[in-house]
């Protein structure tokens, strides 16, 4: 084991971090993991764009002296200011890149469903500026931790144009893949902006389908790669989930790891949740959930019934999340004596479709279009079952929240859902939820039917499911310990065993 006194330095470069800017699980990870690494003794720092939505006064940002000069190949040198803030509740510094032309916009990646035309330059700039920032800070990271395609080019830069840089040239690189579907694929001319030489535009490195593919570049060049669950690490090596990059991933299979995300139990805890009608613990779960169920029914205008199972969904309404198979199955589901609630937004067809369902079945179905933090908590506490029929799910967090709230999840066995939910065994009263494997409406309907049958006919089984789920813990402390191992392994790979022995006395 390495010595605690050796303070590793890690630079996180990402397009999102909660609470500053977040659209998905990526933001949750970058907003949480550095705090737990810092508690372990790490010198960890985060670099983000200062999007228009990141208010300087709200977050108490301080402008650093000087400006950052970023070489952008054929475009020439670009300049940006740097603001310093901190992850809330911690001493972890966050550096915001101030460049109005690139980041002063209402959306992070797109507007009105259309990706910004200059997303290539916006995120190549983020990647290069992250490395240049180390010079401004006079700071040498041991590891640069890149996330998804937005900073996926960083490992390639470290292996090419920054290889002999005295601040970052020795740094190991970790690439975390949060979602394989989005790859950052752009026109070949981006090579002139990257400035790493056209020899790297080949099918083993940066090129895919005659495009520059930033995620592929990271997969090929990172010292080590990880995804946000063990299941997803296996899945992205297959054609079904690899989105055309499964071959590149398989080439690096020996350097690929899966580390499940943690849950912020300060935020998601039924014993302390400020949003729910009554707090409860595993000991008082039956009574507590009954009160929260009535509150949820009242909030959404459903009949106040204790004797009917409530199925809840909090999700983006998109194909990845299984919204299409819910739409296909919902009429059959509502033929049962159940109630069904949905909270979320996404594709316009879903807003109209489920709005019509709610109008046709006001006693059985309710939906709230949009995201509402309070309502999301009320669904987790007040529903009897939580439905997550994802086509793919790198990690997923709602199923973990559901377990904490004694709300057995109904999940498709994929990625992090498969890793974190154990299928119910009626004979032994073990398990924490209900799983199905085929991604179709029939399998979803059958599994919801099984859960409804359990509600009506197996109260002992339902009680066991709730208690079993509430015993589960998916902590950031555990995840941080796994990343700690990964960082040390990456340093050994990058700099060699002898350097590592000398530094850590092993």
Image: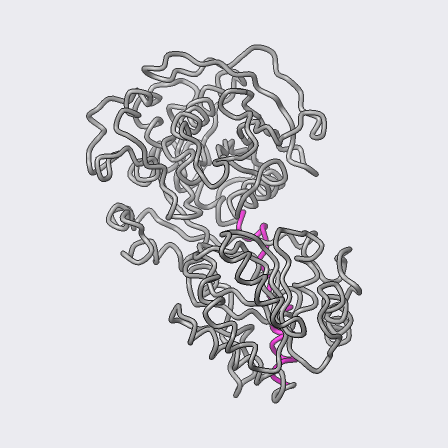
Residue 285 placed where, x, y %?
A: 73, 73
Q: Quadrant of residue 462?
A: bottom right
Q: Nearer the viewer, residue 176 or 436?
A: 436
Residue 106 among magenta residues: no
Q: Position of residue 48 (x, y in %)?
A: 53, 30
Residue 311 lies left or right of residue 448; in this view the side is: right
Q: Please give left or right for residue 459 compared with residue 354 in the image.
A: right
Residue 407 as seen in the image, left or right of residue 70: right
Q: How would you classify the magenta stretch by its main secondary structure?
A: helix
Region rendered in magenta: 460-480
User: In terms of depth relative to the viewer, which is nearer, 464 or 54?
Assistant: 54
Q: Is residue 417 above or below residue 93?
A: below
Colour convention: one colour
- Relative vertical location of residue 85 with respect to residue 208 in this rendering, above or below: above
> Image quarter for residue 157?
top left
Evaluate whether residue 225 shows in this view: yes
Q: x, y percentage for residue 2?
A: 49, 42
Q: Is residue 469 visible?
A: no
Residue in the picture at 28% in, 33% down:
212
Magenta stretch containing residue 471, yes or no?
A: yes
476 to 50, vertically: above or below: below
- Residue 434 higher or lower than 271, as above or below: below
Query: What residue is at 69 percent from the left and 30 percent from the top?
Result: 59
**What is the residue that sits farthest to the right in this orientation?**
278
């Amino acid at each position: 084991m390495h010595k605690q006194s050796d303070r590793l330095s890690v630079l996180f470069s990402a397009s999102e971090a909660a609470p500053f800017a977040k659209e998905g699980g990526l933001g949750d990870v970058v907003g949480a993991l550095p705090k737990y690494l810092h508690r372990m003794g790490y010198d960890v720092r985060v670099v983000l764009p200062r999007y228009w939505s990141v208010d300087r006064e709200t977050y108490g940002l301080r402008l650093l002296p000087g400006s950052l000069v970023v070489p952008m190949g054929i475009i020439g040198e670009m300049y940006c200011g740097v603001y310093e803030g901190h992850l809330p509740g911690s001493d972890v510094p966050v550096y915001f890149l101030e460049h109005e032309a690139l980041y002063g916009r209402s959306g992070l990646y797109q507007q009105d469903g259309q990706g910004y035309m200059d997303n290539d330059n916006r995120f190549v700039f983020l990647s290069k500026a992250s490395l240049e920032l180390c010079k401004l800070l006079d700071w040498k990271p041991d590891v640069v931790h890149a996330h998804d395609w937005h900073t996926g080019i960083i490992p390639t830069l470290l292996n090419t144009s920054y290889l002999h840089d005295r601040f970052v040239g020795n740094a190991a690189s970790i690439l975390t893949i949060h979602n394989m579907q989005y790859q950052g694929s752009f026109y070949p001319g981006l090579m002139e902006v990257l400035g790493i030489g056209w020899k790297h535009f080949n099918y083993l490195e940066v090129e895919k389908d005659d495009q520059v593919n930033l995620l592929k570049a990271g997969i090929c060049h990172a010292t080590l790669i990880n995804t946000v669950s063990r299941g997803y690490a296996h899945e992205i090596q297959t054609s079904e989930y690899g989105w055309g990059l499964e071959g590149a991933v398989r080439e690096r299979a020996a350097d690929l790891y899966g580390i499940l995300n943690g849950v912020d139990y300060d935020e998601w805890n039924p014993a302390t949740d400020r949003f729910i009608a009554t707090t409860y613990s595993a000991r008082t779960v039956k009574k507590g959930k009954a009160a929260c169920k009535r509150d949820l029914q009242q909030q959404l205008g459903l009949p106040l019934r204790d004797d009917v199972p409530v199925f809840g969904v909090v999700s983006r309404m998109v194909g990845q999340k299984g919204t299409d198979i819910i739409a296909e199955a919902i009429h059959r589901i509502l033929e049962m004596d159940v109630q069904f609630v949905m909270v979320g937004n996404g594709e316009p067809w879903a807003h109209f479709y489920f709005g019509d369902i709610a109008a046709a079945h006001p006693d059985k179905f309710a939906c709230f279009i949009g995201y509402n933090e309070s309502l999301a908590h009320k669904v987790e506490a007040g529903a009897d079952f939580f439905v997550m029929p994802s086509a793919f799910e790198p990690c997923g967090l709602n199923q973990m929240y559901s377990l904490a709230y004694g709300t057995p999840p109904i999940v498709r066995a994929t990625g992090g859902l498969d890793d974190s939910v154990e299928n119910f065994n009626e004979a032994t009263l073990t398990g924490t939820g209900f799983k199905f494997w085929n991604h179709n409406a029939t399998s979803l309907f059958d599994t919801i039917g099984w859960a409804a049958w359990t509600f009506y006919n197996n109260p002992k089984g339902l009680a066991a499911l709730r208690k079993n789920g509430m015993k589960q813990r998916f902590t950031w402390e555990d995840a941080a310990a796994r990343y700690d191992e990964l960082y040390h392994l990456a340093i050994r790979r990058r700099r060699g065993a002898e350097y590592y022995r000398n530094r850590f006395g092993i």
